[in-house]
Image: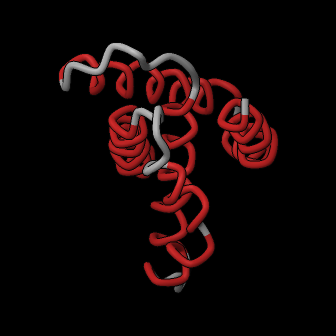
Amino acid sequence: PWHILMNMYSLYNLGTWLELSMGSVRFSIILFGGVILGNLFCLMMNVYSSIGLSGGLYALMFFYFALLFSYSNVSIVSLVRNNIANIMINFLPGVAWQAHLGGAAFGMIMAFLFRFI
């Protein structure tokens, strides 16, 4: 239940801002692409208990981080410090970190692609 509540809270906070700033179509591509790639990462690593939105949320989060790097003077240290709770969630029992990794990869790829589209 804690993980689901955190996902809902993260989607509300980060998702609202990102959808308003980039539009519904691009937002949906990143969110659902992150879910799909996150779950594919789990399948490739023989984790069959992964369901949900975590991969999509990590795609949104890392898309946002990539934008911060591209357009501001943000450092990796400040990003890690401000997101320590999200990092620690990866080490909780029963959390499929593989889905987070797949979603993060998709978010960074999409940030790169959207800069040129």
| Residue 104 in sight here | yes
Residue at image location 45% in from the left, 30% down from the top: 34
Residue 70 sits in which quadrant? bottom left
Task: Give whichever of 12, 116 is nearer the camera.
Answer: 12
Residue 97 sits in which quadrant? top left
Q: List the single residue furthest toward the front.
A: 93
Residue at image location 49% in from the left, 59% down from the top: 87
Residue 37 sits in which quadrant? top left
Q: Is residue 14 above or below residue 24?
A: below
Name the quarter where the N terminus is drawn: top right
Q: Position of residue 40 (x, y in %)?
A: 29, 19
Applied colour scheme? secondary structure
Residue at image location 39% in from the left, 32% down from the top: 99
Q: Position of residue 29 (x, y in %)?
A: 52, 25
Q: Is residue 42 above or below residue 68?
A: above
Q: Position of residue 38 (x, y in %)?
A: 38, 28
- Number of numbered labels in the structure image: 0
Q: Position of residue 63 (x, y in %)?
A: 50, 50
Task: Give whichever of 47, 27 is nearer the camera.
Answer: 47
Left or right of 54? Residue 112 is left
Residue at image location 53% in from the left, 31% down from the top: 56
